[in-house]
Amino acid sequence: MVELASLVTAALANAVPLALAGIGEALLERSGRVNLGVEGLMAIGAAVGVLAGIHLGSPYLALLGSGIAAAMLSLLYVVPVILMGADQIVAGLALFFAGTALADLVGSATGGAPAPPLDGSPRDPIAASTLALAAGAMVLLYRSWLGVEIRAMGESEEYAVARGLRVPLIQGGLAVAAAFLAGVAGAYMALALHNGRWYSGITAGWGWIALGLVILGYWSPAGVLLASLLTGALLASRTLLAAYGVNEALADMAPYLAVLAALLAMSLVAGRRVRPPAMVWRRE
Amino acid sequence: MEPLLEARGIWKVYPNGVEANRGVDVELYPGQVYALLGENGAGKTTLVKILSGVEKPTRGMIRLGRGPAPSSPLQAQRAGVYMVPQHPTLFPNLTVLEDIGLALRMAGIKVSREGARRLIRDASARYGLTVDPDARIEGLGVGERQRVEVLKGILVGRRVLFLDEPSTHMTPGEVDTLVSLARRLAGEGRAIVYITHRIEEALAVADKVLVMRRGRLVATLDREEASRDKVLAAMFGRIPGRPKPASTRPGGEVLRVEDLWVPSPHGGWAIRGVSLKVRAGEVLGVAGIAGNGQRELVEAIVGLTKPRRGKILLNGIDIGGLPPQARMRMGLAVVPEERLGWAVAPGLSVCLNTALPLLARNGSPLLLRRSYAKMLAGKVVREARVKTSGLDQPVETLSGGNIQRLVVGRELAAGPRVVVAMNPAAGLDYNGASMVESMLLETAARGAGVLLIDEDLDLLARVSSRIVVLSRGTLTGEFTPPYDVEAIGRAMTMG
């Protein structure tokens, strides 16, 4: 039972950064843009989070600082792509590489010292905030006119421009907001999942996983939250599987296989009713 | 009385060098319906886009009441100026309520969801435009989408409402309803600008008829003084003559269809045992109401659909099992109903769209000789009188009429033995339609057989050597000139 309780706790802690980054990206993609640089933004968030934590002493100020740093870095994506029409795939990948490299620079300044950690338990206010974020994003997307505007431009940018929707403003705003959340997610990984210590490669590809969760959650904030919980649990169960004597490499693979299966099930069940934003993913 | 909208000396030169508007002056007064007429490419749509703030004029002055020009569609909408586009620009993933509500919000009309629902319900009851506010746009047909657009126009365009070729997707009955709706809206104190190239519709709807030609406003006629001939004269600078029907004696048989059965994609049969012959030098017209198997007949002859039974012979050779390309190489030319995507690749240049299909008929070329391609394309563009700014212009930027001229010109330039054309003049203005008619007749005169499947009975009666009627997948009558249009009409509802 103790094992199960700790598994649940770990699953929830894992789900928080995935959901933070995933929900931000889901909103951005709903408006018709993809930012592939989530991993880079999380990396800079992790490094800034630890450094800021060491100097400021408060993990919450550290999270805030990480969000701001990632939001500023995201201008590398926003300015060329949204304001100047550059290719979003290339810019997103550039952001990933730039963020990762910059994170190593910032992170090495921590000298391996620990920042005051977050406990990463479900009682953590960040976990509650993540829930609130998902609920708020649902209301924004489906109950507000701003949400209608976001979904509209994600369906056809051509019509959106013709009809005078505020395409660059909203896409730019969402890109910056999503980057803020990704930065917080990265800092949360370092402060809650890794005891406040930074090391190179700390985000371990979770930014890429968050991108996948947007698809698994079918571009819905609630869906992304559920997908994050599922993936968080699967990632946590790796140690459990290993404890039961499953080959370690196979145990590492398990979460991804399970996500693939879930993706398949999703498209069979919901594929006909829910549709991804056409500007992001055309399915004919 | 002061005009609601006033424009002086509007010039618009597009980056590709096309001068779409060349010094247009216009004043719009409340309570008036203006019909804006002109052939394709005369500059009607450009003018309206400028007046509704969608595009900026290269030079010229616009005033809205006492205020300055709208510099964006939003500003125009906030001032109560709105354009209902020719093709609906609704977001498929939204509901009717969301789409209209979004437009209202953009126009500065702050409404809640329920407020928008009430506005939609009231307006749709008041003007007889039935829409379900909670329906998803993607589930609506073209007619319903147009209704949503008109409703939106009524709600947003409280002062000046532009209707850009609103009858494009409408049946004659719906057009009558729209005409009386436009008059009623004007009666409520708006200025309505009704863009069309159908003269009868313009005369029915308008208080004033504005005629554009080559970027200029060439005539402003009051309803009383406007007549068909006057309008035609203003549109074209002369009254165009109609082509004469094919008079050559038909030669040998070039296309024979024998007992053709084609299944319908919706189950059952789309074509049920059709047999017909086309001889060299004749135009065989196929009359009928859309949806009675016309599309399937064309697809079977072209090779896009496999018939379940029956034979198709081209010059006596059974082509039933051949792919479309092989049929083209054997002398079959096709003018399809849908131009973009079917007949042309929208993003490619005029030159490639013309030359590649021609070259491909003699086996696909390994290397493209640009000069040769340009020569081929230039010839077609000249002969079909396609208006372009150059051979490098992307086809999608041509007007609808010009695209069709290009397609017809190209298909006929291949020197075909058989031409299959489906509604080739649909959506074209008077001049464009006449041009297409003469080109088909000329092809027949040169010795090809033409199979013309068209919904326009008048057109068929003008050009066909014989007419057969297709109804519910079978041929229900064959007629020879002089045509008894009523009898043909009766045959169209039999079967």
Image (cartoon, rainbow, N blue to C red):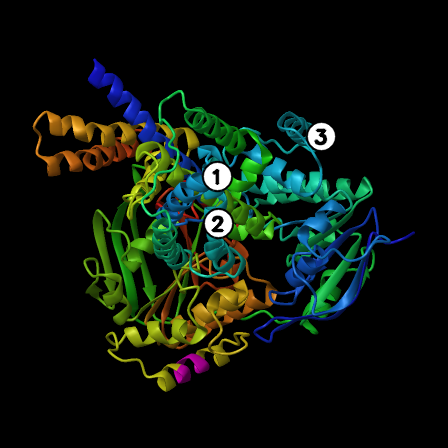
Q: Nearer the viewer, mark 3 or mark 1?
A: 1
The label on residue B488 is 2
The label on residue A56 is 1
Q: Name the residue under label 3.
A: B126
B180 is within the stretch colored magenta: no
Inter-mark Cα distance, 3 to 1: 65 Å
- In depth, the one of B262 and A181 nearer the eye is A181
User: Crowding at label 2, few (<14), some or many (≥20) Cα neighbours within 10 Å?
Assistant: many
Secondary structure under badge 1? helix
- In depth, the one of A69 and B360 nearer the eye is A69
- Apparent side of residue A38 relative to residue B177 in the rendered image (left or right): left
The label on residue B123 is none
Quick check: marks 1 and 2 in contact, CB under 8 Å?
A: no
- Bounds of the magenta span? B374-379
Type of residue at label 2?
Answer: Ile
Residue appearing at x 40%, y 20% in the figure? A123
Type of residue at label 1?
Answer: Leu
Q: Which chain carries label 2?
A: B
Q: Which chain carries label 3?
A: B
